Image (cartoon, grey):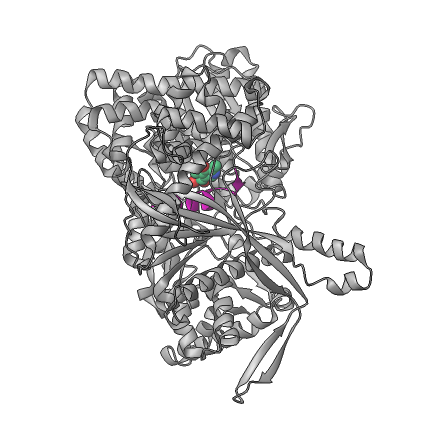
C-alpha cells in the first residue's frame, strides 16, 4: 500500500507529471494550483463569488504546498545522518505575515506578482488580507522570528518551540486619544500556514504532591502525583530558508483536555463537569500576557511556561529515542536556547524527566542538562526579572521545587568552596530570595543550569557582568559572552522595501541579501549624483505610501516632503516617548513665539502599544494625541510641524513605517535598553539615528561612524554616577527656563483644556523622581534635534549619511548573530539539503 520516495532531477514544469500542481514553480502550475485550491479547499466553484479571503487562502495553500515539498525533501536529506539540532525555546514568536516572506524565500515573488497581474489581480491585495500571528509583545518575540529565518537560511536544522495562543497581542485602537484594546482574533478566518498534528501530543501534569518510594532495587525515588493533567497538541508552521532547500519548523503547543482524565465524572453522569474541565484546560493557551517588560506573577502565566517547556522536552526526547540514542547523549543531539527566563523551568523539567522518569543518577543528569541549555538575558530592568513566589511555584510544580532546592544546595556548596565564609555572596547567589515573601529567582536558575549565558549587545553584556549577574560572572566567567542582536534583511528590506532592494541590487548585485556585509560596496556610490537622486526617490515613494496609510488610519494629512521623525516601539517610560513629546512642545513654543521663523518642516510620527495595565504608558499616549490635536489644528503650525499617533504598531505596520523614516528615535535612558532591534531596521532602511549611547546604538554608531549619527545625552556610567550622588530633577527644573516653559504649558492644561489636571501624574513623576532622567537629557536632546534639522536641509549631506547608514549595517544581520551562536554556544553546523532533486512517489514500495 505504501509509496516509495525516489529522487529524480527536476525536469521543469512540463505540465505532465501529477505532482507539478503542488510543487511546480512555473506560472502555469502556480495558477492551476490556485484555481484547484479555490475550488477544492475553499469550495468556490465560481471565481466571481470568491471573497478576498477565499483568494488569499487558495493562494496561501498554493505556496504552502511548495514549502511542504521542500520540507519533505529536507527530511529525506536528514535521514540516517547525525547532526546537532538547535531548539529555540521562546514564549513569544512575533512572526508577522507569512505569505510575502514565503514568496521571497521560495524565490517566486516577482513571477507570482506577474502571474496575478496578467489575471487582473494585485498581489498586494492578497498580502493585505493576511491577519498576522501576533504571538509576541515586541522586540523579544520579533528576535525569535528573525532567528528562525536565519537558522533556516544558514541551513541549520532547528525547531522553534512555543505557545499557540488563541489570542495574541491585542489590537490597538484609539478612542478620544486613549488606547483601547481589542481582542486579536487571528485564527478566525483560518490559518493556512499551520498543520495540526493531533498525533503529536503529550500529557503535562500540574499541581498535586510528591511521594517517596523504593524501586525494585531498593533505591530511593520520588513520584509526582498531579492534581490535573493537560494535553498539548503540536501545530507546525514550516519555516523556509532564503533560496535554500532547508525547511525547518515552528512547533507551537495548544492545550486541550485529556480524554481519559474526566472518565470518572462521565461515569457518574456528570457530563457538565467533564465539559467544564475541558474548558478550564483549554484556557491555558487562550491568551498572550500583554506585558513587554513587566513581570506579572500570575499562576496561569507559570502554567503556560511549564506547559510549553514540558511538551517541547518530551518531543525532543521522543525524537532522540526514535533515532536510536540513549539519553546520556541528549546534549550531543540538542542545543536548547532559552529566550529569556520564560522557559527556564526547562532546567528542572529535564532533570525531573532524567532522574525520576528515566532513573538516571543525579550527576549524569546534571551534566546532560547543563550541556543542553544556554540562556539569553534580555533585560536589566529589575521589574522585568522573573521571580515566582515559592508558595505559588510549589503548589503548581511540587516536584520541580524539590529539584530546584537540590540544585541550589549543591550550587551553594560550590560557592562555599570557592568563596569560603562569604555569607553575603551565598545569599546573593542563592536561587531563593529569602527576603520578604520567599521567591524563586528564575535568572539564577538559568545561570546555574546553563553552560552559556549571553547578553544581546556589547554594553548590555558588560552591564550584566558588572551589575545584575556580577556574582555569577565572578563564579563562572567562562559562561558569559555577548551576542549582539540582528534582524533579517529578507523581511526588513527585501519584502518591506522593494524599491531600495531593487536599487541596491542594480548596483552591487543580490549577494547582500545573504551576506549583508556586501552592502559596504554601496560606499562607492556615496557621492554619485544619480544614485543620490534615485535613493531619495525611493525614500519619497515610501513616505508617500505611509502618508496614505496615515490618512486612512487617522484622517491626518501629512506632507511626504517633510522630515519624517519616527518613534515606533512599545510605549514605556524607559524608552522615553515623553522626552520626544517634550521636544515637540519646545518646537511648538518656539514657532508660537516667532510664527515666521524659517525652520525645517517636520512630521513627528509615533506608534506603539502600551501594556493594558500600565497607567503611565497609557497616559503618555493620551499626551501625544492631545499635543497632536492642538498642533495639527493650529494654523501657525501649518507647513512646519505635524504630530501623528499611528495606531496598532505590529509587524505589518512596521514594514510600512521603517522604510519611510528619515529620522529614527532611539532615545532610551542609557543603560536601560538591552539592545533594541528597531534601531537596526530603521538604519538598514536608510534612516539616520538620533540616540543615546544605549543598547546596540553604541555599536550602530561605531559602524556607521560618529559623523552619521546624532548622539546626545548621558552615558550609562554618568547615569549610574548621578543616581549615586542623589539625582534631583527639581533643581534642573528650577534652573532651566526652556524646560519649565514646556512643563508649565502641559500643567496649565494647554493640551487638555477640559481637564487641566489630566497629565498631573506624569508631570509629578517627572518633577519629583524622574526615574528615567528626562530632565537631565532634555537640553542635550533639544540641541541635538536642532542639528538634525540643519543637517536635513543640506540634502546632499543627508543623502550621503543615509547611504552610509545602509552601507554599514552588515553587522546587524541576524545571520551574523546566528553564526556566532552556532560557533560559540550551540556547536551546530549547516546540513546542506540542496534543491536540485525533487521527490517522486512511486507506487509499490513501503514508505
Ligand atoms: C522590531 C520590532 C520591535 C522592537 O522595537 P524596539 O525599537 O527595538 O523596541 C517591536 N515591535 C515590532 C512589531 C517590531 O517589528
Q: Residue furthest front?
A: 844
Q: Position of residue 671 (x, y in %)?
A: 41, 48
> Which of these two is toward me, 95 or 802?
95
Q: Position of residue 143 (x, y in %)?
A: 42, 45
Q: Is residue 151 above or below residue 651?
A: below
Q: Is residue 172 above or below residue 845?
A: above
> Which of these two is toward me, 118 or 180?
118
Left of 309 or right of it: where is 283? right
Residue at the image position 19 percent from the left and 24 percent from the top: 525
Stretch in magenta: 133-150
Left of 112 or right of it: where is 612? right
Left of 128 or right of it: where is 505? left
Q: Position of residue 450 (x, y in %)?
A: 40, 65
Q: Main secondary structure of the magenta part?
A: helix
Q: Quadrant of ligand 1?
A: top left
Q: Quadrant location of residue 175?
A: top right
Q: Is residue 663 above or below residue 375?
A: above
Q: How many marks?
A: 0
Residue at the image position 53 percent from the left and 39 percent from the top: 134
> Which of these two is toward me, 364 or 288?
364
Q: Quadrant location of residue 516?
A: top left
Q: Residue furthest right?
A: 269
| Residue 832 seen anywhere in this rendered image of the structure | yes
Q: Position of residue 305 (x, y in %)?
A: 55, 57
Q: Residue furthest left?
A: 524
Amino acid at each position: 500500500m505504501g509509496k516509495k520516495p525516489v529522487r529524480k532531477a527536476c525536469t521543469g514544469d512540463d505540465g505532465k507529471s501529477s505532482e507539478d500542481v503542488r510543487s511546480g514553480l512555473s506560472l502555469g502550475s502556480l495558477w492551476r494550483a490556485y484555481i484547484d485550491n479555490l475550488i477544492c479547499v475553499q469550495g468556490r466553484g465560481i471565481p466571481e463569488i470568491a471573497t478576498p479571503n477565499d483568494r488569499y487562502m487558495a493562494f496561501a495553500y498554493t505556496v504552502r504546498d511548495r514549502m511542504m515539498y521542500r520540507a519533505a525533501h529536507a527530511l529525506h536529506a536528514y535521514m540516517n545522518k547525525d547532526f546537532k539540532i538547535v531548539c529555540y525555546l521562546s514564549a513569544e514568536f512575533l512572526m508577522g505575515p507569512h505569505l510575502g516572506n514565503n514568496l521571497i524565500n521560495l524565490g517566486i515573488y516577482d513571477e507570482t506578482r506577474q502571474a496575478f497581474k496578467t489575471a487582473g489581480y494585485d498581489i498586494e491585495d492578497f498580502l493585505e488580507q493576511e491577519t498576522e500571528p501576533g504571538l509576541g509583545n515586541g522586540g523579544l518575540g520579533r528576535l525569535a522570528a528573525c532567528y528562525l529565518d536565519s537558522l533556516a537560511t544558514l541551513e541549520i536544522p532547528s525547531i522553534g518551540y512555543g505557545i499557540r495562543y488563541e489570542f495574541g497581542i491585542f489590537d490597538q485602537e484609539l478612542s478620544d486619544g486613549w488606547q483601547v484594546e481589542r481582542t486579536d482574533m487571528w485564527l478566525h478566518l483560518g490559518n493556512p500556514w499551520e498543520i495540526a498534528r493531533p498525533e503529536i501530543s503529550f500529557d503535562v501534569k500540574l499541581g498535586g504532591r510528591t511521594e517517596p518510594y523504593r524501586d525494585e532495587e531498593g533505591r530511593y525515588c520520588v513520584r509526582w502525583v498531579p492534581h490535573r493533567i493537560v494535553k498539548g497538541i503540536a501545530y507546525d508552521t514550516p519555516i523556509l530558508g532564503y533560496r535554500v532547500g532547508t525547511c525547518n519548523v515552528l512547533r507551537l503547543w495548544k492545550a486541550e483536555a485529556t480524554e481519559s482524565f474526566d472518565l470518572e465524572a462521565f461515569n457518574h453522569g456528570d457530563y457538565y463537569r467533564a465539559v467544564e474541565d475541558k474548558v478550564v484546560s483549554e484556557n491555558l493557551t487562550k491568551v498572550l500576557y500583554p506585558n513587554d517588560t513587566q513581570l506579572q506573577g500570575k499562576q496561569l502565566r507559570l502554567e503556560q511556561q511549564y506547559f510549553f517547556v514540558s511538551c517541547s522536552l518530551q518531543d525532543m526526547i521522543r525524537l532522540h529515542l526514535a533515532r536510536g540514542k540513549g539519553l546520556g547523549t541528549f546534549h550531543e543531539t540538542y542545543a536548547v536556547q532559552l529566550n529569556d527566563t520564560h522557559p527556564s523551568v526547562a532546567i528542572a523539567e529535564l532533570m525531573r524527566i532524567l532522574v525520576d522518569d528515566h532513573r538516571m543518577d543525579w550527576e549524569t543528569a546534571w551534566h546532560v542538562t547543563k550541556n543542553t541549555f544556554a540562556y539569553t538575558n534580555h533585560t536589566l530592568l529589575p521589574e522585568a526579572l522573573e521571580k515566582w513566589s515559592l508558595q505559588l511555584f510549589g503548589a503548581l510544580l511540587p516536584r520541580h521545587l524539590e529539584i530546584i532546592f537540590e540544585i541550589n544546595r549543591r550550587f551553594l556548596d560550590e560557592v562555599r568552596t570557592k568563596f569560603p565564609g562569604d555569607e553575603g555572596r551565598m545569599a546573593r547567589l542563592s536561587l531563593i530570595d529569602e527576603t520578604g515573601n520567599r521567591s524563586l529567582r528564575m535568572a539564577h536558575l538559568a545561570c546555574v543550569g546553563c553552560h552559556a549565558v549571553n547578553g544581546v549587545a556589547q554594553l548590555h553584556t558588560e552591564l550584566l557582568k558588572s551589575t545584575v549577574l556580577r556574582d555569577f560572572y565572578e563564579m563562572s566567567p567562562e559562561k558569559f559572552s555577548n551576542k549582539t542582536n540582528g534582524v533579517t534583511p529578507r523581511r526588513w528590506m527585501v519584502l518591506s522595501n522593494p524599491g531600495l532592494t531593487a536599487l541596491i541590487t542594480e548596483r552591487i548585485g543580490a549577494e547582500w541579501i545573504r551576506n549583508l556585509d556586501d552592502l559596504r560596496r554601496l560606499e562607492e556610490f556615496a557621492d554619485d549624483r544619480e544614485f543620490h537622486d534615485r535613493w531619495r526617490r525611493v525614500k519619497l515613494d515610501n513616505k508617500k505610501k505611509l502618508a496614505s496609510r496615515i490618512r486612512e488610519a487617522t484622517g491626518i494629512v501629512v506632507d511626504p516632503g517633510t522630515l519624517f521623525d519616527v518613534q515606533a516601539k512599545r510605549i514605556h517610560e524607559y524608552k522615553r516617548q515623553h522626552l520626544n513629546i517634550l521636544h515637540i512642545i519646545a518646537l511648538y513654543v518656539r514657532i508660537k513665539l516667532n510664527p515666521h521663523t524659517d525652520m525645517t518642516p517636520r512630521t513627528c510620527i509615533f506608534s506603539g502599544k502600551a501594556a493594558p495595565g500600565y497607567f503611565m504608558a497609557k497616559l503618555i499616549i493620551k499626551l501625544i494625541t492631545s499635543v497632536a490635536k492642538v498642533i495639527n489644528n493650529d494654523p501657525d503650525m501649518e507647513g512646519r510641524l505635524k504630530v501623528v499617533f499611528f495606531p496598532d504598531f505590529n509587524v505589518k505596520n512596521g514594514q510600512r513605517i521603517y522604510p519611510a523614516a528619515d529620522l529614527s528615535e532611539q532615545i532610551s535612558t542609557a543603560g536601560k535598553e538591552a539592545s533594541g532591534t528597531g534601531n537596526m531596521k530603521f538604519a538598514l532602511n536608510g534612516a539616520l539615528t538620533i540616540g543615546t549611547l544605549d543598547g546596540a546604538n553604541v555599536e550602530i554608531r561605531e559602524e556607521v561612524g560618529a559623523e552619521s549619527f546624532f548622539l546626545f545625552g548621558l552615558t550609562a556610567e554618568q547615569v549610574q554616577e548621578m543616581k549615586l550622588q542623589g539625582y534631583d530633577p527639581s533643581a534642573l527644573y528650577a534652573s532651566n527656563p526652556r524646560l519649565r516653559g514646556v512643563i508649565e504649558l502641559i500643567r496649565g492644561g494647554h493640551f487638555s483644556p477640559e481637564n487641566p489636571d489630566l497629565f498631573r501624574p506624569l508631570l509629578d513623576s517627572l518633577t519629583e523622581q524622574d526615574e528615567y532622567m528626562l530632565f537631565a537629557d532634555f537640553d542635550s536632546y533639544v540641541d541635538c534635534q536642532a542639528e538634525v534639522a540643519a543637517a536635513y536641509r543640506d540634502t546632499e549631506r543627508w543623502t550621503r549619511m543615509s547611504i552610509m547608514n545602509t552601507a554599514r549595517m552588515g553587522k546587524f544581520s541576524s545571520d551574523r548573530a546566528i553564526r556566532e551562536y552556532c560557533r560559540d554556544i550551540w556547536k551546530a553546523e549547516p546540513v546542506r539539503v540542496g534543491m536540485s532533486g525533487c521527490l517522486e512517489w512511486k507506487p509499490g514500495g513501503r514508505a
